[in-house]
Amino acid sequence: MPMSRLQAFAPVARADAHTLILGSMPGTASLEAGEYYAHPRNQFWPIVGGLLGFDPQAPYAERVETLAARGYALWDVLGACRRRGSLDAAIEPDSMEINDFPAFFRSHPDVCRVFFNGGFAATLFRRRVLPVLGERAATLELTRLPSTSPAHAGLSAEAKRAAWTALLR
């Protein structure tokens, strides 16, 4: 049975964003909910809400508005792909469609920091996005952070939170 094509979300970003947080592709729970990081055990909202001082249990619309109002944009490297389940390792390599980052950076000229939620997002961005950004690539500070996914159980929630404090620098 062929896998269906998964479509990612539009970015959460205001024109004055200064920082971009990138995942690879929303997981099944997120796609079903229509929300970034919707899996109940994903640590993204508890970590980021705690660091930026907003309620990680607030309604989704309130969380993304607060994040954007503080200058943080949220997106994924992939705009579409085929994948069985939620794991990055299950993405069919020949199905990966990269989001339009040249257009994103043109419309968000103040973004100078990019944080990656996990290694796969960082690797994809470095291999598939940086080469098409031209001179803009040199203006970006790139930081890989540990994945907030429950599948990344090698680090405790406390260790993940400690690493994610880099957002505040």
Image (tube, rainbow, N blue to C red):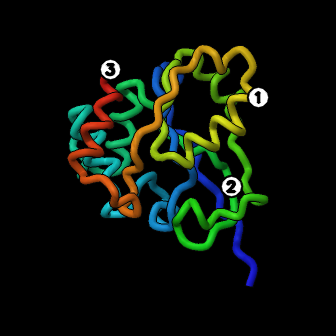
Q: Position of residue 41 (x, y in %)?
A: 31, 62
The residue shown at (47%, 61%) is 30
Q: Secondary structure at mark 2?
A: strand
The residue shown at (31%, 47%) is 45
Is 83 positioned to the left or the right of 39 in the image? right
Q: Tally the numbered discs.
A: 3
Q: Secondary structure at mark 3?
A: loop
Is 37 positioned to the left or the right of 43 in the image? right
Whether residues under marks 3 and 1 lie with C-beta atoms below 8 angstroms apart, the answer is no
The residue shown at (39%, 58%) is 152
CA gap between label 3 and label 1 equals 27 Å
Q: Nearer the viewer, mark 2 or mark 1?
A: 1
Which part of the image, by quadrant, shows the N terminus? Answer: bottom right
- Residue 85, above or below 132: below
Residue 25 in view (yes/no): yes
- Residue 32, above or below 15: below
CA gap between label 3 and label 2 equals 32 Å
Q: Position of residue 138 (x, y in %)?
A: 63, 16
**Crowd rating for badge 1 (residues with CA inside 10 Å; few <14, some 14–19, many 20+):** few
Front position in the image: 96 or 152: 152
> Looking at the image, which residue sits at the far front?
154
The residue shown at (25%, 53%) is 156
Q: Amino acid at mark 3?
A: Arg
Q: Amino acid at mark 2?
A: Ala
CA gap between label 2 and label 1 equals 18 Å
Which part of the image, by quadrant, shows the C terminus? Answer: top left
What number is the disc on residue 80? 2
What number is the disc on residue 132? 1
What number is the disc on residue 169? 3
Q: Nearer the viewer, mark 3 or mark 2?
A: 3
Whether residues under marks 3 and 2 lie with C-beta atoms below 8 angstroms apart, the answer is no
- Residue 93, above or below 61: below
